[in-house]
Image: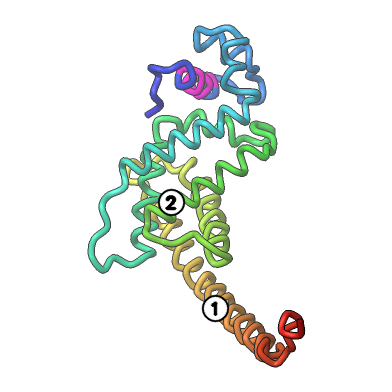
Amino acid sequence: MIDETTDKGRIIAAAMRLAAEKPWGDITLLDIAEAAGQRLVDLKVHFASKGAILSAFARAIDDDMLRRVPSRTEGQAARDAVFEVVMSRFDALAPYKRALRSIMRPGGAPPDPAMLRSFLASQHWMLQASGIDTGGPGGLARVAGLGSVYASVFRTWLDDEDPGHSRTMAALDRRLRSGERTLRVVDDALGFAGRVVGLVTSCGRGRRPRTDAVPDPAAQI
């Protein structure tokens, strides 16, 4: 849940309450400030746009998700760990589903670089919570891969009224299995490319002249 003991938290919570009541595209920063019981100049201290508020909301959900994620069991498959983490995120988002429908409606939230960065950061934390590395080129591929899976399943979750989220879980399991096969191919390709680069680099080093074969100018003095 959003911490409403701070001005920043009250602004985020007010924005989500307004989004649950009317289209996100019709809401102004002044509306949000007034709903939070603050002046617009006070909101400006924390946020420059509605996109920045949504990015802060996503970061708050990241924290809530990480608190909810169950401890991994020994020998747990990576796909099962990711499944648990994504469902934990949906649990954290559940109180805001109505607001998110408004925000995700066509014309709701226009593209915003800050929102894209927060989206990718969320994928990073979900993978980390699953015990999956996000470093290097392979990590970037994993972040992008989970982002594709999550974006697809998120839309299913938005329309899933079943308390048990059966449609969401079925869609997530299906997409994770497909994504797992794709990422395995990507990881194999990246590993092969890394070995080729290493081989070429080592060969290049082997063709360099030996330093002990080059006369030292200082020795001629």
Residue shown at 43% from the left, 40% from the top: 62
Inspect the magenta stretch and tell me whether residue 58 lies in it.
no
| Quarter of the image with the C terminus in it | bottom right
How many residues crowd around disc 2 within 10 Å: few (fewer than 14), some, or many (20 or more)?
many
Q: Main secondary structure of the magenta part?
A: helix
Q: Nearer the viewer, residue 217 or 79?
A: 217
Q: Earlier in the sequence, mark 1 or mark 2?
A: 2
Q: Secondary structure at mark 1?
A: helix
Q: Secondary structure at mark 2?
A: helix
How many residues crowd around disc 1 within 10 Å: few (fewer than 14), some, or many (20 or more)?
some
Q: Is residue 89 left or right of residue 137?
A: left
Query: Where does label 2 land, which residue?
Result: 126
Q: Amino acid at mark 2?
A: Met
Residue 52 placement: quadrant: top right
Q: Amino acid at mark 1?
A: Gly
Residue shown at 50% from the left, 51% from the top: 123
| Quarter of the image with the N terminus in it | top left
Q: Nearer the viewer, residue 6 or 98?
A: 6
Q: Position of residue 114 (x, y in %)?
A: 63, 37
Residue shown at 65% from the left, 25% from the top: 49
Q: Position of residue 110 (x, y in %)?
A: 69, 35
Query: Where does label 1 land, which residue?
Result: 191
Q: Position of residue 215 (x, y in %)?
A: 74, 88
Inspect the magenta stretch and tell me whether residue 17 lies in it.
yes
Against 64, is 167 above or below? below
Residue shown at 67% from the left, 36% from the top: 106
Start and end of the magenta stretch? 10-18
Q: Is residue 164 left or right of residue 219?
A: left
